[in-house]
């Protein structure tokens, strides 16, 4: 204490909290959960004064180095965006017990204790899929609708399970196709699969969940006659207003923004999973001019 003066500025006010997002493969502009998470963090930055940044991943091998980079930067809260990042996040949770983490789209197995330095955030994708399935079942003219996904993973496939249930509930005669392209970046493969479903299977509504591959699916829809698309995660009708009739919404950005708010207010409550569904606005569907009032 020697040398301290009453006139010196000895403020201990904390600098802005640092929030770092480790994105899944597909990039920040994937028009899916990466983009939604980043937009939610930007809203948190504007509203709560936190400092946000992200690191993109070109492959699964990038997840752990990106986490380490944020740790080296003294990041307060590290967010793993997407199911694919979950293994790397779980390893980091064990290796750095004093570091706080968020894991979006994944959680721990039933009966497994969740560590105190992580909050898993999950969404009931099946509910959003069910809603757009009701729409597809009512609006199909060929009685053939389809789903094209990136990978058969727990954060994606429930969309399609709900979609099929909803479609068949309102239209027992409907046929529901499903195929995965094993990529969240391959637009050309997305287009080829969509064209096959349109030209060979007579599908007239396509539910797309392939990240960057959606661009190719939208191309195929635009080039065909009277074919409609259903987006995923974010409102996607702006990408093709004449063709995308709705989107199955998973409000990743809102969930992350609220988590950041809890964190800076001291209500993080690590060790507990937070689930978002229809009851709390975590999932839903996009309203567009394509939807007749009786369908709504």
Image: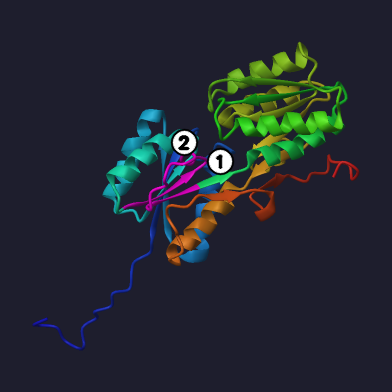
Q: Can residue 54 be spotted in the picture?
A: yes
> Residue 97's spot in the image, x, y percent?
30, 50
- Which image quadrant: the N terminus? bottom left
Q: Nearer the viewer, residue 45 or 64?
A: 64
Residue highlighted by disc 1: 33
Q: In the rendered view, tell whether residue 261 sits above or below residue 92.
A: below
- Indicate whether residue 292 is drawn in magenta: no
Residue highlighted by disc 2: 24
C-alpha separation, residue under disc 2 versus residue under disc 1: 9 Å
> Residue 146's spot in the image, x, y percent?
73, 23
Q: In the rendered view, tell whether residue 46 sits above or below residue 1.
A: above
Snapshot quadrant of residue 174: top right
Name the residue at 59% across, 26% down. Answer: 213
Snapshot quadrant of residue 32: top right
- The reply to whether callout 2 and callout 1 are in contact (CB within 8 Å) is yes
Q: Residues within 10 Å of mark 1 (few under 14, many from 20)?
A: many
Name the residue at 56% across, 52% down. Answer: 255
Q: Which residues are magenta?
A: 99-120
Q: Residues within 10 Å of mark 2 (few under 14, many from 20)?
A: many
């Amino acid at each position: 204490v020697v040398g301290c003066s009453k006139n010196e500025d000895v403020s201990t006010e904390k600098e802005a909290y640092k929030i770092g997002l480790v994105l899944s493969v597909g990039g920040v502009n994937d028009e899916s959960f990466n983009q939604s998470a980043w937009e939610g963090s930007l809203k948190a930055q504007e509203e709560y004064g936190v400092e946000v940044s992200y690191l993109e991943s070109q492959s699964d091998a990038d997840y752990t180095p990106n986490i380490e980079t944020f740790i080296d930067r003294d990041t307060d809260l590290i967010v793993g965006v997407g199911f694919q990042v979950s293994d790397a996040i779980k390893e980091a949770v064990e290796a750095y017990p004093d570091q706080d983490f968020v894991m979006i789209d994944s959680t721990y197995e039933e009966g497994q204790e969740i560590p105190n330095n992580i909050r898993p955030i999950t969404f009931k994708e099946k509910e959003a899929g069910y809603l757009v399935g009701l729409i597809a079942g009512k609006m199909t003219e060929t009685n053939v609708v389809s789903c094209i996904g990136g990978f058969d993973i727990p954060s994606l496939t429930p969309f399609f399970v709900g979609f099929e249930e909803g479609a068949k509930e309102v239209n027992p005669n409907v046929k529901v196709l499903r195929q995965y392209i094993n990529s969240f970046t391959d637009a050309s493969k997305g287009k080829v699969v969509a064209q096959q479903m349109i030209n060979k299977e007579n599908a007239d509504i396509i539910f797309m969940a392939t990240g960057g591959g959606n661009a190719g699916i939208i191309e195929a829809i635009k080039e065909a006659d009277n074919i409609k698309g259903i987006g995923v995660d974010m409102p996607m009708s702006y990408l093709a207003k004449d063709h995308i009739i709705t989107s199955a919404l998973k409000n990743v950005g809102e969930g992350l923004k609220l988590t950041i708010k809890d964190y800076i207010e001291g209500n993080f409550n690590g060790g507990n999973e937070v689930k978002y569904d229809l009851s709390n606005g975590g999932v839903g569907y996009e309203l567009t001019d394509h939807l007749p009032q009786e369908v709504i």
